[in-house]
Amino acid sequence: MRKLDYAGAIREATTQEMERDPRVFVYGIGVPTWSSIFGTTKGLVEKFGPERCFDTPISEDAMTGFGLGAAIRGLRPIHVHIRVDFMILATNQLVNMVSNYIYSTGGRLKVPLVVRAVIGRGWGQGAQHSKSLFSNFTHIPGLKVIAPTTPSDVKGMLTAAIRDDNPVICFEHRWLYWAEEEVPEEAYEVPLGVGRILRPGRDVTVVGLSWMNVEARLAADILARRGVSVEIVDPRTLAPLDEGLILDSVRRTGRCIIADCDWVDSGFSAELSARIHEKCFGQLKAPVRRIGFAHTPCPTVRELENEFYPNARTIVHAVEDMLGLEAANLDGEDFFSHERRFRGPF
Amino acid sequence: MKDEATYRRLFRTALLIRLVEERIIALYPSDRIQSPVHLSIGQEAVAVGVCDGLRPDDLVFATYRSHGFYIAKGGRLDAMFAELYGRTDGISGGKAGSMHLTAPQVGLMGSSAVVASTIPHAVGAALSFKRRGSDRIAVTVFGDGATEEGVYHESLNFAALMEVPVLFLCEDNGLAVHSHRPVRQAYRLAEHAAAFGIGSRRLEEGWDMLAVREATLQAAAKVRAGAPFVLEIATSRYKEHVGVGEDFHFGYRTSASVDAFKRRDPLIVDAALAKALEPELEREIDAAVAFAEASPAPGRPELLTDII
């Protein structure tokens, strides 16, 4: 099978759905321009024309309401935000209008709207280009929230999102755009609301969110060499959550670390931890542990950024601590460094 | 020379709206309607004139003060009272209530209690018409206060850029809750619209249903041809912002401003016609209220329907 990167998988899912269904269109600030949202919308305007792939004014609020109006009329809009930090200008529409439209019309109107938002760390992106804000949206009934990690998942989940009659918010970590794997060429759906075991293991469950699954895989490799078997569970869909998959894993291992790429306080990890303690308390060998951003705004300077973000090291040490192992010397390990791939400016 | 048949048709619907809201006032102390109501008494001519000037298949996006537009668009009265009562036979099974009346089957696509929020929805719906080569139009109804929201500006800009068939309809009662326009607006609506190349018109005679209808027909014709348009209609809210009483005793406005409007209000001036139509309309309302009274309350299963 041919390999495809995450950005290419998004582009392919969008292209195939636009070919299949003339009601699908994609829009947002910069969408048809040369920068094309990290290449995810590249070539769409050439293929489908400016009526189905278009730029917008810098008006996140109205553009979200516009998408809602088009969606309840049977069109299937995909609205793209180059940063989730910008999407929060549309919070009124997402939280007051989009999320409750189906409910408050007694199901007579559907809202097949997809909102894509880029999250994640870059290169000195500072406090306003770096958030995730998962729990701001998983908190709201009526929204589906997804955060695919792998190229094959993002292709199938975005396809499912476009075909869904409910509003779906898709969080895409910018470093994942470079990830490559074998991705089927034909269109397919990965059902929303179904998680995935990325790596089976026995000793401890690591629930990874988005990019943190990449860090968790690296941590699991390091720990495997020390005889520790880590199971990695990727919820993929944050709402509705595949709780059963996570709980089953935790019941088997008896230990759980939640590796979120977001703030910890009142974050998605808090929700998950609460559910695990509520439902698996008797099977836990240790309290659930949570990993996430430091509770500060994201600093711009590299040295502080490195302290702000968790990574594979953080996970390795959390597992060691939970299992009562001595901290390993990680000096010889090869950790991910985005500076090898990316030097800005954006 | 007034078209008598049209006048009577419009008058009948306007009177129905007023009598419905007067019934709501009468019922309110019984606590059968357990949610806020925003009455449009005084503003009926706008809803009636506008909806009669539109085609039945044109779509309306409205506000929390939309009993009038719901009725003028042809929404079922019994399902509306059941909705106000929060009963299972309400148009949204009681989940919407007075502030979120929606009747897509007659073209009322939504109404919102967050000021200005439905304005961009009409722009999106208008795009669906343009895409399908349809000559239907989308109308967004809002008060003068809504034009202070950024989303109004954003929506005008995008509608002009996309050349989509939207009619921006401003019901100007001069008040945003209890605040008068001079403390709120440093701009003039027509000049603001003109900056986007959008045509506009202000109609001062908001009590005159036929004038509102004529202004809507003219504006809708421009919109149908592909040009967004702003139609501003001066009107008067007789009752308090929310609730069923009057609010002159609070001192923020005087009854004089409303009295001047009332002296032109056909539902008051044309008392003979009102008296002639009243018995039939009251029977219609009686039947709708009886329908609501008989409808069962929703329960736990209904709470969890139509949600992910």
Image (tube, coloured by chain):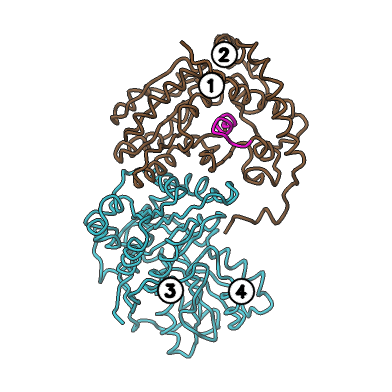
In front of the other: label 4 or label 1?
1
At which x and y percent is residue B261? 55, 12
How far is the residue under mark 4 from the one under mark 1? 66 Å
Q: Which chain is home to disc 1?
A: B
Is the residue A215 above or below the residue A74 in the image?
below
Question: What label does residue A287 carry, if any?
Answer: 4
Q: Earlier in the sequence, mark 1 or mark 2?
A: 1
How far is the residue under mark 1 from the one under mark 2? 9 Å
Q: Amino acid at mark 1?
A: Ala
Tell whether label 2 touches label 3 (CB within 8 Å). Answer: no
Query: What residue would you read off at disc 3?
Result: A213
Q: Colour of chain B?
A: brown
Q: Quadrant of residue B192?
A: top left
Question: What label does residue B45 carry, if any?
Answer: 1
Spot the cyan chain and give its letter. A
Q: Which residues are magenta?
A: B65-76
Q: Earlier in the sequence, mark 4 or mark 3?
A: 3
Tell whether label 2 touches label 1 (CB within 8 Å). Answer: yes
Q: Residue drawn 64% across and 78% down?
A: A284
Q: Amino acid at mark 2?
A: Asp
